[in-house]
Image (cartoon, rainbow, N blue to C red):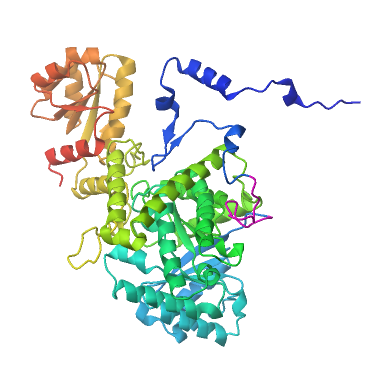
Amino acid sequence: MIKKEKLFEKFPPVSTDKWMEKVTADLKGADFKKKLVWKTRDGIEVMPFYRQEDLARLQDKGFLPGDYPYVRGDKVSDNAWLIRQDVTVRDYHEANLRSLDLLMKGITSLGFIIEDPETINVENISLLLNGIHCESVELNFVSAGRARELFAALESALWASRTEMNHVHGSIAADPLGRLMAKGKLCVSVEEGLEYLADIVAESESIPGLRCVQPSGTLFSNAGAGPATELAYTLSLGNEYMAYFTSKGLKPDYAASKIGFSFGISPDFFPEIAKLRAARMLWAIIVKGYGPRKDESTLMHVHAVTGRWNKTLYDPYVNMLRTQTEAMSAVMGGADAITIEPFDVIFREPDNFSERIARNQQLLLMEESHMDKVADPGAGSYYIEELTSLIAREAWKLFLETESQGGFLAAMQKGVIQNRINTVSASRKRDVGKRRETLLGTNQYPDFREQNAPRSDTGRLFNDASQSPDDEVKRILLSRGAEDFEKLRLATDRSGRRPLAFMLTIGNPAMRRARAQFSTNFFACAGYQVKDNNGFETASEGVKAALEAKADIIVICSSDDDYAIVAHDIFTLAKGKALVVIAGNPPNIEALKAEGLEHFISVRSNLLETLQMFNRILGIN
């Protein structure tokens, strides 16, 4: 008879102190905090490991899916979500045909982006929904105005088609305060906008599952905000609406049922999972403060959208990898509906190929990876549980700070929110320029075969960040981390020439190879042609090969010791014929500068500023 043994009982438990002793020994004197403790974009310090004992101090432990405050959501048997894809509505008949086609390809949530609000009427909305079984698919509408008319037209169209109103689910994504921050002004006063919104909420009682208000965290994340900051300001925005609606006599349960949230998902894989879990918990606490009759009324409805801040024009297929990990974060965080934006959405109108890929990315996660089968798959992970608590605490702290300033509207009118996020965005862009934050294919490891940018729409690619004199509030600056690099490379593309950076490798084999690899990546980020070499025996041989190749830039790649021997000769031979650059930051740099060498590149260089300088020198504007 085989005796079953519990193998773990053969190993004695190891205390945290013992683990720390081992880690400290392996670090060999290096600072533990500097080496292993990392910070989120919001400055939250995260330890390299957590243990079961860390869960003991967490307040939200012991809850099950479906339990207030819903940190684990309300999905008790699975982790199913709605797969959403947007349809731009210019011609209502064409949009209807497009929607019917999407529903046959796995889409369970439609987002109608109505370009011209003036076209909204009962006939057009009826045409848009013709043939769609509105009780079986989530219906979402986005329009830059006339939300009340949109609801009235939708209600009439649904009544006319004899749709069971209690089975309809969806949203009309009205967010006047968010729009005010993005555009700087509204077509009406803030008070009129809020009153207009309250009227829509009151009138939409006939469709219980229709949410008429959608505070959008994408406004903050697409401007560069970190997970905790996005969460804090989105909650504050939602609270502003809750406070207004209840002040107008709407019941807390009803008011909360009409608010749905949209969050952007960044590439911070685990923090984004934790953000959505923390979001549900904090919103439940906020709504609870208004005295709802049922705990279920405090449940947050989450629509997650892949972010844009990290998306790029160059090497664009990398965007697919970015959106895939972002979607995985949203799934594991328990989002109710997810939109994966096509990989080319930031630089042109998506085509059938990019939309199909985006749609199939979600189908892959659901049908092949089976990520819809386990409720709250992140639960129990010490790391995710701790991150949830850390992000919740940081977001709550900023939320309370915003409330102490009079709430979201008051803080926005003072410019406090915009200043904070714009400062963070500028800081992140500097980090991208210095390669402290990596954008693959843009500021690190560019595709050397990529000759020119993909077909793009400049108006879509770069946001107009200018402030208008008649703006009522300071605008939040929606931007992307790659924008400055893209402007740099577009200038190179449009100049009609690709400068050649020639690697003059000489001396120490290991050092010349390492520095040549660094330098080819460095100059390729500007769209320059780069030519690597196996090595030259003499300075004259290397310069001759470089000039025969018609090099614009000669990059000396060698060891620090060799630079003292060969740099002067190379510079003398190439002077006036090509720019000479030294790869590295050698100890004798001042002596080299005294001989006339002025260009040095290293890991300490600001990549963006250095490449902009070379473009100016080469006459590329």
Residue 469: quadrant of the picture: bottom left
- Which contiguous range is marked in magenta? 62-77
Q: Is residue 342 above or below residue 500?
A: below
Residue 68 in the magenta stretch? The answer is yes
Residue 466 in the magenta stretch? The answer is no
Q: Is residue 135 visible?
A: yes
Q: Is residue 598 left or right of residue 505?
A: left
Q: Nearer the viewer, residue 76 or 90?
A: 76
Residue at x 39% of width, y 50% of height = 398
Q: Is residue 524 above or below residue 404?
A: above
Q: In the image, residue 377 lies at what x, y percent? A: 62, 47
Q: In the image, residue 190 lies at what x, y percent? A: 31, 71
Q: In the image, residue 69 lies at what x, y percent? A: 58, 54
Q: Main secondary structure of the magenta part?
A: loop
Q: Is residue 137 left or right of residue 184?
A: right
Residue 28: quadrant of the picture: top left
Residue at x 12% of width, y 38% of height = 617
